[in-house]
Amino acid sequence: MIRFLVVCTNGLGTSLMIRLNLQTVLAEIGLPEDIEHTDVSSVHLYQPEVIIGDDSVVDSIRGRTEAELISLAHVADRAELKQAILSSTSIQHVLK
């Protein structure tokens, strides 16, 4: 099971919306979910394999984590999220 961390500036609205979309996407592709969401300043408290957030948030944590980063230009676009998940190195290892 892959551990996901969804991040936004305050850890409330955007990260929750992405989390809900991620739950749907993972169900569609048949992967179990292990998802947390938080604010950008709390990323260091988690041990995720994949971190997802909007472009600016992901850019702000780049180089501060060993997790795979998935950056979204349009956080409400479930199709963009699904494509990013399917292109993820971590997901590709699990789907093989």
Image (cartoon, rainbow, N blue to C red):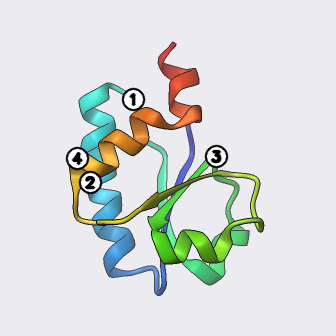
Residue at mark 1 to residue at mark 4: CA–CA distance? 17 Å
Taking the spot 66% from the left edge, 72% from the top edge, the residue there is 61
Q: Amino acid at mark 2?
A: Asn
First reached walking from the N terminus: tag 3 or tag 2: 2
Q: Residues within 10 Å of mark 4 (few under 14, many from 20)?
A: few
Residue at mark 3 to residue at mark 1: CA–CA distance? 14 Å
**Front-lying residue, 35 or 89:** 89
Instruction: Name the residue carrying label 4.
Output: 79
Q: Residues within 10 Å of mark 1 (few under 14, many from 20)?
A: some
Instruction: Name the residue carrying label 2.
Output: 21
First reached walking from the N terminus: tag 1 or tag 4: 1
Say if 91 sits above or below 85 in the image: above
Q: Position of residue 75 (x, y in %)?
A: 31, 66
* Element marked by disc 4: helix
**Front-lying residue, 56 or 13:** 56
* Element marked by disc 1: loop
**Front-lying residue, 66 or 4:** 66
Name the side, left or right, on which 40 lies relative to 24.
right
Q: Amino acid at mark 3?
A: Glu
First reached walking from the N terminus: tag 2 or tag 1: 2
Taking the spot 39% from the left edge, 70% from the top edge, the residue there is 15
Say if 14 sits above or below 23 in the image: below
Instruction: Name the residue carrying label 1.
Output: 31
Mark closer to the observer (1, 4): 4
Residue found at the very far bottom of the displayed protein: 10
Residue at mark 2 to residue at mark 1: CA–CA distance? 14 Å
Q: Amino acid at mark 1?
A: Leu
Q: Does any portion of residue 18 appear in the rendered image?
A: yes
Q: Position of residue 12 (x, y in %)?
A: 38, 81
Report the disc number at residue 49: 3
Q: Amino acid at mark 4?
A: Ala
